Amino acid sequence: MAYAEQYIDKLRKSGLRPTKQRIKICEVLFDTDKTFHFTIKELVKIIENQANIKVSLATVYNTVHAFIKKGYLKEIPLNASQSYYDTNVTHHHHFFDEEENRLIDIHQDDVDEVNIKKTIPGKKIKSIEVIAKIVSDNQSQK
Ligand SMILES: [Zn+2]
């Protein structure tokens, strides 16, 4: 099956009409060996550079959020001035570089089990995602 057909399928399953713009969004998001993190603004830039077409912020935003609902993308629960998204939908953790505003994956095996002592009555922990904020270590730059 051609990539385009897969993307049309993904879009339809997400309740979106497969327009030319949206198929381009899919190409950027899913036609790559490497997963990546992005903000909506960054994604618009990548699409415009790579596909040489104009897409509106609203179209990209709506498409990304429809994909999140379907589990094709993940939103990173990060308290930053803008939202960050991930094409890697497997369970994993992150470094967030506060100086470069950049997320870096941490494999699940590289984090020991997190021990949370507090419990909420009637609730259990479903999953834990760690975000370690990082800054330059001036000590080691001699
Ligand atoms: Zn990630």
Image (cartoon, rainbow, N blue to C red):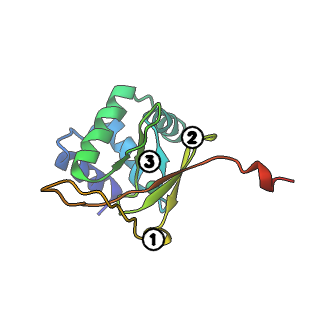
**Cα separation between marks 3 and 1:** 33 Å
Residue 37: give x, y in percent of width and height: 47, 48
Q: Which residue is mark 3?
A: 28
Q: Nearer the viewer, mark 3 or mark 1?
A: 1
* Quarter of image, ligand 1: bottom left
Identify the residue at image location x=34%, y=43%: 23
Q: Amino acid at mark 2?
A: Asn
Q: Earlier in the sequence, mark 2 or mark 1?
A: 2
What's the distance in space between the residues labelled 3 and 2, CA to CA? Answer: 21 Å
Q: Position of residue 99 (x, y in %)?
A: 63, 40
Which comes before the other along the chain, label 3 or label 2?
A: 3
CB under 8 Å between callouts 3 and 1?
no
* SS at badge 2: loop
Q: Which residue is mark 2?
A: 101
Determine contact: label 2, label 1, CB under 8 Å.
Answer: no
Residue positioned 44% across, 47% down in the render: 28
